[in-house]
Image (tube, coloured by chain):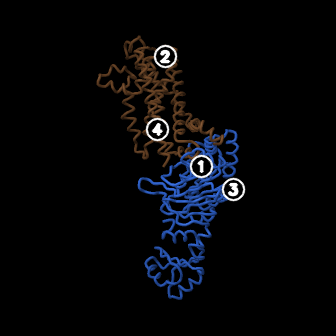
């Protein structure tokens, strides 16, 4: 990728002896929607802060829009939009005022900031709440306001750290719709998430991160093809009996024995279920589903994403 | 660097001050009531009440008790703003309403954020001291026209409490440290700084509190302009150097600590 907007090579961040980010390398192309998928504590937010040019790396190389954040932090930040994991809207200010003061930080003249603030409130479906207090907004609205705020400088790259954590399903879908529109307009998105569905919805390409390292890289579908089967059969025999039942399932496909259920990876889930019953086992519940990034993560790390 | 990035680099601190001033609007009523009510109450209590008990004049020059106490009260008003903003304002931005973190993801640097907060604090002090000065005039508490200089010296005194901002920037957990600080350090400093009685009234073994206290230097400095001079010029020079030095030191440490804290 000769024109990549972000290039990280052996990027490392250590806190004393603990490496939160342990030598990761990746590139992001302009207009691409790139994801970092991993559980809490994988080093995603730390990576985002380094890419956001606010956290100094311990070692490795990092180039954002062709500049080194150690040398050109303010110049880089002037072209980024940042949606942090925890909203840091100013609760002393009204909704629209939050956009106005933030826009000023980029040196944008008042009149232009005011015009953009109104457009972004429309985009974020908050135009009717312009004068509301921030604390009176719902979680989803605050998140949309934070995204609107991040767009006030018309950024070349939008960084979203866990954009929908803590939101209800409806609020998540509204947010995804807004982000999808940005993607269509050609904004480069970098998203961290521990939700596989979010990664599948938003990301063209992603890296699976665990313990500060990259475990795999590719498009969601390519990762599923490479690390999982087409379908997954989930069977439950009761927590006491799962291990015993698993011993009788040898040969059906790759098995993952979780505390509450057994996953059987097979290209034909229904066929695998028929075979389970043929072997004299009677699962309490059974479910055949398509493979997801969750399965990829389980395969790569032996753990589920949300524990 | 783009033009906008340059503008932000030049004016960043002012944008932060502008933001804080906008935030102040939601407390405008309280701020105004305090800024006007405090001087009226204090000057009335000291000038009309306590002054009747203080027989004779205080200090050289034969000035009234009210005239003696007024410059200290004005400086104390700036110190009150400083205490509030340097302690609570700084921790607010890092923790309770973490706007500093948001500011730092824009072109603003840690230094600009702190500069902006200090600028805002100075503006708040300016408003408070101007009001105080006007009410002092109404009470006849300022004999000399030079007394106007009490506004900048008052602000300087308030800013000399900036080491509290540096301390506040180090706090990650609020365990009531501010309440202790206000009772154990700020209150004694206020009482033993030659504010409501001359420092020389204290036994010599307690006078060092005043010499260390920015408030004593600030109050004495104000008195030189309001009805002075009452002391040798070199001592007046020391007041200025001491206040500027402490203010600058506190500012430098706050910038350093805040920048480090934002870069995590």
Q: Is disc 4 placed on a helix, strand or loop?
A: helix
Q: Nearer the observer, disc 1 or disc 4?
A: 1
Label 4 environment density (alpha carbons within 10 Å; few <14, some 14–19, many ≥20) = many
Q: CA distance from mark 1 to mark 2?
A: 58 Å
| Residue at image location 36% in from the left, 35% down from the top | B184
Q: Chain of mark 2?
A: B
| Residue at image location 65% in from the left, 41% down from the top | B4
Q: Mark 2 and mark 1 in contact (Cβ < 8 Å)?
A: no
| Residue at image location 54% in from the left, 38% down from the top | B112
Residue situated in front as seen by the camera: B202 or A82: A82
Q: CA distance from mark 4 to mark 3?
A: 41 Å
* Chain letter of the blue region: A
Q: CA distance from mark 2 to mark 4?
A: 35 Å
Q: CA distance from mark 3 to mark 1?
A: 21 Å
**Residue identified by numbered label 4:** B254
Label 1 environment density (alpha carbons within 10 Å; few <14, some 14–19, many ≥20) = some
Residue situated in front as seen by the camera: A253 or A197: A253
Q: Which mark is residue A186?
A: 3
Q: Mark 4 and mark 2 in contact (Cβ < 8 Å)?
A: no
Label 2 environment density (alpha carbons within 10 Å; few <14, some 14–19, many ≥20) = many
**Residue identified by numbered label 2:** B142
Q: Is disc 2 placed on a helix, strand or loop?
A: loop
Location of residue B103 with respect to A191 vertically, above or below:
above
Location of residue A291 in the rendering, given as x and y in whole percent from the top left corner: 58, 73
Q: Nearer the observer, disc 1 or disc 2?
A: 1
Please tell me the colour of chain B. Answer: brown
């Amino acid at each position: 990728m000769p024109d990549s907007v972000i290039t990280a090579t052996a990027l490392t961040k250590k806190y004393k002896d603990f490496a939160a980010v342990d030598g990761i390398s990746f590139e992001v192309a302009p207009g691409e929607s790139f994801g970092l998928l991993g559980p809490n504590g994988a080093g995603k937010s730390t990576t985002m802060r380094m890419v956001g040019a606010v956290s100094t790396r311990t070692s490795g190389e990092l180039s954002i829009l062709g500049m080194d954040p150690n040398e050109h932090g303010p110049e880089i930040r002037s072209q980024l939009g940042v949606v942090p994991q925890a909203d840091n809207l100013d609760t002393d200010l009204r909704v629209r005022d939050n956009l106005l003061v933030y826009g000023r930080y980029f040196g944008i003249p008042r009149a232009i900031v005011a015009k953009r603030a109104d457009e972004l409130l429309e985009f974020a479906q908050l135009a009717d709440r312009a004068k509301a207090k921030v604390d009176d907004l719902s979680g989803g609205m605050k998140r949309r306001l934070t995204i609107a705020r991040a767009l006030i400088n018309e950024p070349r790259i939008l960084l979203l750290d866990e954009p929908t954590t803590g939101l209800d399903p409806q609020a998540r879908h509204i947010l995804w719709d807004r982000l999808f529109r940005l993607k269509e307009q050609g904004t480069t998105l970098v998203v961290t998430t521990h939700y596989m569905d979010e990664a599948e919805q938003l990301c063209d390409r992603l890296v699976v991160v665990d313990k500060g390292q990259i475990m795999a890289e590719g498009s969601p579908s390519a990762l599923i093809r490479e690390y999982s089967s087409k379908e997954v059969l989930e069977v439950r025999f009761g927590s006491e009996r799962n291990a015993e039942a698993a011993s009788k399932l040898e040969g059906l496909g790759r098995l993952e024995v979780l505390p509450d259920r057994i996953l059987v990876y097979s290209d034909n889930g229904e066929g695998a279920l028929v075979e389970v019953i043929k072997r004299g086992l009677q699962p309490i519940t059974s479910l055949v589903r398509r493979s997801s990034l969750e399965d990829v993560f389980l395969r790569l790390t032996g753990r589920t994403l949300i524990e | 660097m783009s033009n906008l990035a340059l503008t932000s680099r030049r004016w960043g601190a002012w944008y932060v001050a502008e933001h804080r001033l906008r935030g102040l609007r939601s407390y405008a009523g309280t701020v105004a009531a305090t800024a006007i009510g405090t001087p009226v109450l204090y000057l009335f209590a000291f000038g009309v009440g306590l002054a009747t008990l203080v027989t004779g004049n205080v200090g050289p020059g034969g000035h009234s008790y009210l005239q003696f106490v007024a410059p200290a009260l004005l400086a104390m008003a700036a110190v009150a703003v400083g205490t509030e903003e340097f302690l609570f304002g700084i921790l607010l931005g890092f923790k309770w309403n973490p706007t500093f973190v948001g500011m730092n993801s824009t072109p603003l640097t840690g230094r600009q954020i702190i500069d902006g907060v200090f600028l805002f604090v100075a503006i708040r002090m300016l408003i408070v001291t101007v009001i105080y000065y006007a009410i002092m005039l109404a009470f006849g508490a300022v004999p000399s026209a030079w007394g106007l200089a009490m506004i900048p010296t008052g602000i300087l005194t308030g800013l000399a409490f900036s080491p509290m901002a540096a301390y506040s920037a180090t706090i990650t957990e609020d365990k009531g440290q501010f309440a202790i600080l206000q009772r154990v350090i700020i209150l004694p400093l206020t009482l033993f700084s030659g504010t409501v009685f001359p420092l020389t009234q204290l036994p010599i073994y307690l006078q060092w509190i005043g010499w260390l206290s920015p408030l004593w230097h600030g109050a004495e400095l104000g008195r030189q302009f309001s009805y002075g001079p009452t002391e040798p010029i070199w001592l007046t020079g020391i007041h200025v150097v001491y206040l500027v030095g402490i203010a600058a030191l506190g500012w430098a440490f706050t910038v350093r600590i805040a920048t480090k804290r934002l870069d995590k």
